[in-house]
Amino acid sequence: MTQPSKMPDAELTALRNELMAKPFLTDDLTAVEDAIARRHQALLHVKDTRKPRSGENRAPVKALVVVGAFRYGKSRAVENGISRLKQLETPSGPLLPRPLSINAPEHFTIEAFGRSVLGRLKLTPARALGPSMTIERLHSRIVRNKPTLLHIDEAQRMLTPERVAQHRREEEQVKIFGQLRALIDLDEWPLPVVLSGTPELARALERDNLGFFREVAEIIAIAPMRVGNQTDQENLEDALAAAAEKVGMTVDIAVDKFYDRLIHAANRARGLAFDICHEAILLAASAGRKSVTVEDFIAFYARKAGALRAANPFAAADWHRIDPKVLLAAMSGEKVPRIWEVK
């Protein structure tokens, strides 16, 4: 029997890019997309319809905060929503989407934040200016360049500002969120802000001293999937079928509770589950096969986590007892739990 020929590396790379280009649609992703679209549409709103649409006459804009645990798909949902923005028609001509996206500086300070945004505008100061002058320059450059949205990913880093003692941390957080509120309220060019980060971000905004930011923010929490939940199972089944079809392949899965196994293997993280589907498809394609099977999922998990079949949730009979953090740890570079241990 002739063995299928392996896919060349260049074709495999193109296939990976094609898979990543289209997100899997879920209720969470749709909610984030709609919320971003509303903030973009609000750029047309004015305080007084008898006056020209200018910075001073622009209606207030709002923030969006998208939170979820690691690999839950929050950043991907925001990026998808931003990529789908359309131009807006104004009396003075079309307003094109001009989003700015940054990762919050790992060692967060107000000056580092300002320099990161200026860097995206290709206007990074040649030397350190200090926090006050950096923010002053940031405001003037935003008014001049007129971005339509600012997205800050890994925004939970704002909760641990650099070189700030624990007892002064809340005070510094108030200053940081105060600077974000200043961008939202900028007289000459109010700027919608989207934050994506871990659930700590939403919990911090519950505090009274951050109420001034919470009052202009909508919070969307990306929920974990649940083993046994029919909606989650159907979402994954549809996503896998759509991804395989997109690259000319079929799905041939014949194993008990496969989608529950997938939810468990991903530690309930939707984004990670989607990535596992992509990787299984790529394994099948690299071998020259036209159908993705459970063996591709078993092989990916074994390769990434070093698990034998007895400790592989896609193969083991008692899959629900396997530690669900194994794969997540392996893919994030953390210490992997011993694969033969069960919960």
Image (spheres, rainbow, N blue to C red):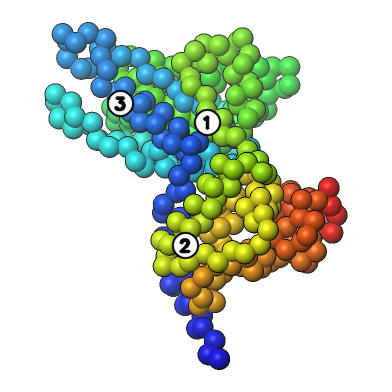
Q: Is residue 180 left or right of residue 96?
A: right
Q: Which amino acid type is shown beneath numbered disc 1?
A: Val
Residue 298 at x, y percent in the picture = 67, 65
- Quick one: label 1, few (<14), some, or many (20+) residues within 10 Å? many
Q: Is residue 128 visible?
A: no
Residue 50 figure quarter:
top left
Q: Is residue 107 left or right of residue 136?
A: right
Q: Nearer the viewer, mark 2 or mark 1?
A: 2
Q: Which amino acid type is shown beneath numbered disc 2?
A: Ala
User: Of residues 71 and 317, which is closer to you in this image?
Assistant: 317
Q: Which residue is mark 1?
A: 66
Number of the label disc, if any, that sits on residue 218: none
Q: Nearer the viewer, mark 2 or mark 3?
A: 2
For image coordinates 38% across by 38% down, the residue present is 82
Among numbered discs 2 and 1, the one appearing first in the sequence: 1
Number of the label disc, if any, that sits on residue 244: 2
Spatial CA distance of label 2 from label 3 is 35 Å
Q: In which quadrant is the N terminus drawn? A: bottom right
- Quick one: label 3, few (<14), some, or many (20+) residues within 10 Å? some
Number of the label disc, if any, that sits on residue 41: 3
Spatial CA distance of label 2 from label 1 is 29 Å
Q: Is residue 87 visible?
A: yes
For image coordinates 53% across by 19% down, the residue present is 177
SS for dot 3: helix
